[in-house]
Amino acid sequence: MGVTAKIAPSMLSSDFANLASEAKRMLDFGADWLHMDIMDGHFVPNLTIGAPVIESLRKHTKAYLDCHLMVTNPIDYIEPLGKAGASGFTFHVEVSKENWQELIQKIKLKGMRPGVALKPGTPIEEVYPLINSENPVEMVLVMTVEPGFGGQKFMPEMMDKVRMLRNKYPSLDIEVDGGLGPSTIDVAASAGANCIVAGSSVFGAPEPAAVISLMRKSVLENQEKC
């Protein structure tokens, strides 16, 4: 596979009062990306952060800020997040059936990397047009829990979606988010996921660096088997 392992601690599980130091701590522990959950209280019930927080954090880190937009109107967030310094902009396919081409174009124009996410109940086939497009998304995020809250239980049945994607698109970045940790990483990595979002399993661990290292090792070992 022509993809690299990327471990992205979910900052939703961090201490928000100390976001800059938490980000540095995760990077020192070996994180590749920092996963930022942006929720609008409408697409999902929870309300989290927006562009002002991304802008504040960007002043303290050069890290890749992997932004997952759980919002009803992602197009409204492109300009502010681009200005704030977001690196990746992943929108949900469920709210972009009419304007995904415009979204991808505008995300790229603002210097961000476009990705598309899908909820557990959404068929994987719905993202294929966005990958096959002349101006495609560059990552697919397969939610392994219902989006909106951290600390949920991993849904192994979502791995069929990951397998289908990996078989069809060997060089695509495939991200998984929800319930990932030492007990579930092998299932995800063997299915073909290479970008791993992990919240409570990293932030709640006595040794977060060991958890990040273990997850990277699993992805790399499973890539070697392919």
Image (cartoon, rainbow, N blue to C red):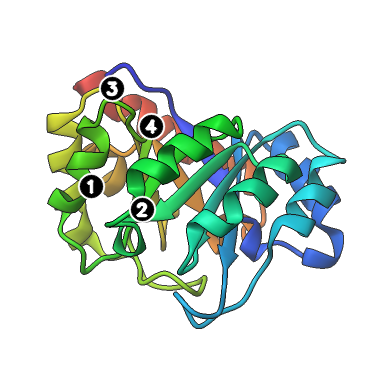
- For the residues marked 4 and 1, what is the alpha-carbon distance in whole angstroms? 12 Å
What residue sits right under mark 3 in the picture? 171
Give the residue type that dot 3 points to: Ser
What residue sits right under mark 2 in the picture? 117
Label whose residue precedes the other's in the sequence (4 or 2): 2
Judged from the image, the secondary structure of the residue bearing numbered disc 2 is strand
Residue drawn at point x = 67 percent, y = 57 percent: 206
Query: Tag on residue 127?
Result: 1
Residue drawn at point x = 41 percent, y = 61 percent: 178
- For the residues marked 3 and 2, what is the alpha-carbon distance in whole angstroms? 17 Å
Are the residues tagged 3 and 2 within 8 Å (C-beta)?
no
Label whose residue precedes the other's in the sequence (4 or 1): 1
From the image, which quarter does the N terminus lie in?
Answer: top left
What residue sits right under mark 4 in the picture? 138
Judged from the image, the secondary structure of the residue bearing numbered disc 4 is loop
User: Comparing marks 3 and 2, which lies closer to the viewer?
Assistant: 2
- For the residues marked 1 and 2, what is the alpha-carbon distance in whole angstroms? 8 Å
Judged from the image, the secondary structure of the residue bearing numbered disc 3 is loop
